[in-house]
Amino acid sequence: MTDHDHGHKRLFSHPEMIRDLLCGFVPEPWIAELDFSTLEKYPTVFVSDGLQERRNDVIWRLRWGSDWLYIYILLEFQSSVQRYMAVRLLSYLGLFYQDLIQTRQLAPNGTLPPVLPPVLPVVLYNGRVRWTAPTEIAGLMGDGPAALISYRPQLRYLLIDESAYADAYLATQRNLVAALFRLEQSRGPTQVQEVLVALADWLRAPEQHLLRQAFLIWLKQVFLKTRLPGVELPELHDLEEMRAMLAERVVEWTEQWKQDGLQQGLQQGLQQGLQQGLQQGLQQGLQQGLQQGLQQGLEAERRLLLRQIHKRFGAPVAEPSTPLLARIQQSEQFEALGELLLECPDGAVWLVRLGEIAGM
């Protein structure tokens, strides 16, 4: 299991995350009938009759409607496409039902023998490429004799592909899982800062201390390791400290984002060049990728500086600063402007100095 999988497992070991996952990303009418106050975790280590141990990720159960009917939710966290995921989940489901039978935890059914409860298998995917594996086990099987079709096993899992949700949509949701998706799909420090401010506000209640810590651990051990590789982070105790630390190191962070943009642009350019063939296509792709990466980095720095201007001097100064900042095309100038912003005594002086640097 990867660090990403471990990080998700820790986060989704909290009932608030399961509630927001179901309410925000399972578009089914029966979700409204669930009693989320009854959410409880179920053990995720099963041993078969052959003593072969299989580990799942996270399983919860909760009451459905007025009856004591439990729903068991299996979550499989993946960061790469697994073609035979349906087979893997079918195996997990068989061991899970076997465990319920052995521990006598089946649902009552009046005078009839107890029945197996329904299960919702969920695959939570955050990979860079879209998920292409079949979500039904039938999609992995050949035709075979028609007489055997009725004997085929049946299983379908719910795929939640993070990249399928636009940031503009996720930003409108007061939803912890949507916030997690925004962080994982983020393309700049400004967006991350917005999410951290929201999380600190949503999780300020004392009883949410453990969930706050889970997010903090995920940010340090998973998220920032990929966004700021090799950077030694200070000891942090809450989300607000994390947000403040990132604000202080925003120049370094933006530079890393810019390099990511360059690498992504180069890769896109190379792929485009190979598809077009010959050296001309390759050169065009490389130039386009370099320009796109540079522009992404400059735009991130421009947005961040504008937010800082707004916080210090307000909208009357931030608005006329916008067209002046649009004229800045060098990263070194943004670094100098960041220091200048702290030195200027008022907005009038700032606009004069900004105009000078912008060549107005």
Image (tube, helix red, strand yellow):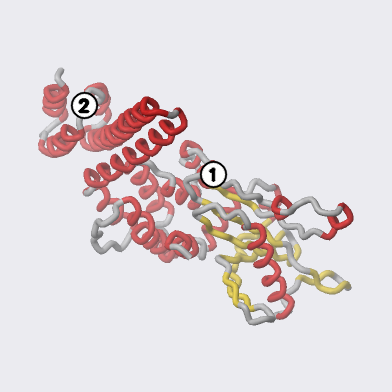
- Tell me residue 60's x, y (percent): 61, 65
Asked if residue 178 is positioned above or below residue 44 in the image, the reply reads above
- Tell me residue 122's x, y (percent): 61, 56
Which residue is pictured at 60% across the width and 66% down the height? Answer: 59
* Residue type marked 2: Ile
The total number of labels drawn is 2
> Can you name the residue that lies furthest to the top here?
360
Residue 59 vs residue 190: left or right?
Answer: right
Residue 261 vs residue 156: left or right?
Answer: left
- Tell me residue 14's x, y (percent): 51, 63
Which residue is pictured at 56% across the width and 58% down the height? Answer: 18
Determine the secondary structure under disc 2: loop
* Residue that badge 2 annotates: 328
Q: Quadrant of residue 71?
A: bottom right
Q: Which mark is residue 130?
A: 1
Asked if residue 228 is positioned above or below residue 335 in the image, the reply reads below
Q: Dividing the image into 4 quarters, which one contains the C terminus?
A: top left
- Tell me residue 216's x, y (percent): 37, 60
